[in-house]
Image (cartoon, rainbow, N blue to C red):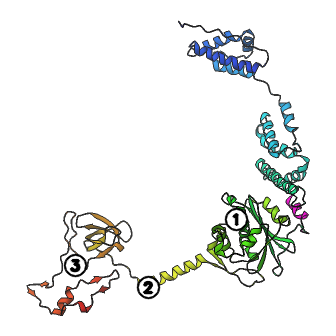
Amino acid sequence: MDSFALSPLQPLNLTGNVSHNFKLWLQRFQIYLKAHNLDMETEERQVNILLNYIGDKCITVFNSFNLTNAESKSVKTVIDKFTDHFAPKKHLTLLGHNCFARKQKSDEPFEDYFTAIINLGLQCDLRALREELTKAKIISGLDSKYDDLRTRLMAEEDKTLTLSYVTKYLKTAESSRQAVTQMQKDNRVDVSPMSEDVLLAKSKVNSGVLSYFDPKSHAVLSVDSSSQGLRAVILQNNKPNVYSSRALTESEQAYCSIECEMLGIVNGCIKLRQFLIGRRIEVHMDHHPLETLFKRPLNKVPPRLQRMMLALQGFDLHVVYKPGKELFIADALSRAFGDEKVEKEFYTLNEEIICQGNASADLKPKVYRLPEKFVRHQDTVKKYYDKRTRPLQSLREGQNIRFQKHQSGHRYAGKVKGKGPQPRSYQVRDHSGNLFTRNRVMINPSPRQSSPTPTTPPTNSTLEFPQPVQIHQQIGDSTLQETAKEKAVKNLDNKIKRSGRVVRNPKKLFDD
């Protein structure tokens, strides 16, 4: 017997929050079973213990479940039935009304409005129609200031108008309007928080439509940079012809202000080079130190700025400082930059050499591509190299050779065992019996052969190596007596090149 006794369970309290009371009572019941080692008993006995302590009113509820004999003996089934009975009932009609009556407040950010609609939709039993109804509710519940956006979204096709598309579209529109509102507070340009087209119309540009580029008219490149984007626009007669904008990379966002402004000029010249090459361009920017920097010698400029200025050597630029309030178009583009990827050639500017020339009607720049010239140079070198080269002679099995064991130039004597697994490779053995696989380039035929006819292949245990050629060679039983000059010539160690050419020492080294 245990030295302590546990107090019995109290009946379930059916007043107040019954669902919460049942969760606590069920936790106490499980503790009671483990404390008395009753959790190892049969399920039928655990059900009886539960009904004994839960109370008379709950037994009446148990009888209303109409369980079968097998289900009434399963403790898990009985607990699930009580849990479903005491769980709070959802008023689906009220929840649906709260969801579809929710509208965006005038000062409520779209992110908060979107989160509230999603949470209300999860409480309703929408099932398969959850995404479609949530999308429709988000569009219909927008504030009146987004009436133009609601009209645009309703005009889209159903295939395109997905929930993710609507969410991304509205978030982008809200961020753009916040940028315009910030410009209003800074008094940089008199605009209303509307679309980007209205921003251009409210500027000094007489028309919000891009005009055609005139090669004979004076062109101005207006550039600006912000903490997150770059922008450039070409103006003629105070009207935009073409513009470009992109976001800064993570490394570029760490640049100082003068480097960002210089990067904006480089970006504008590279992106819009087909309009700028071959003519004098006036560059307008709002960073005064750059105007002085372009007048300094290139070797007096910091390294990073020096590399950027080297990329601009193919352009005829005249940099002029303008206050920021006058660069309204470029400033607006920098705050509404696109997620355009950085061109690969923007960071490999040395791959092209852009040469200045006279302006032409079609404005086609004269560009020399270094990779193409390099390929042509390689083809020319290969052509003349192939004229002077000859294929290496093939080796036969058992032939005496000298080969390189390592990358060093020293060669060791050996014999050919056979061809290797790779093209132009051979298997050779040295005087110690070690087997090597070497390319034909690393093998030279031995200049001294004991016999021009092939011999029997050597075994792995013993190898026969050539003996030095004697001055007096035995032919039959007689010995040929040679003159001093012929003797000196045979005594020379002639060198045979890979091409097969024999190199002899000069005659002045001969013995008299």
CB atoms of marks 3 and 2 within 8 Å: no
* Mark 1 Cα-neighbour bin, 10 Å: few <14, some 14–19, many ≥20: some
Amino acid of disc 2: Lys
The magenta stretch spans which residues? 194-206
The residue pinned by badge 3 equals 449
Residue 14 appears at what percent x and percent y? 77, 14
Residue 393 rendering spot, x and y as whole percentages: 33, 78
Q: Is 491 placed left or right of 355 in the picture?
A: left
Res 8 quadrant in image: top right
Residue 76: in magenta span: no
Q: Quadrant of residue 417?
A: bottom left
Per the rendering, the mark at residue 387 is 2
Residue at the image position 63 percent from the left and 74 percent from the top: 299
On whether residue 195 falls in the magenta region, the answer is yes
Disc 3: CA contacts within 10 A as few (<14), some (14-19) or many (>=20): some
Q: Is residue 148 above or below residue 269?
A: above
Q: Earlier in the sequence, mark 1 or mark 2?
A: 1
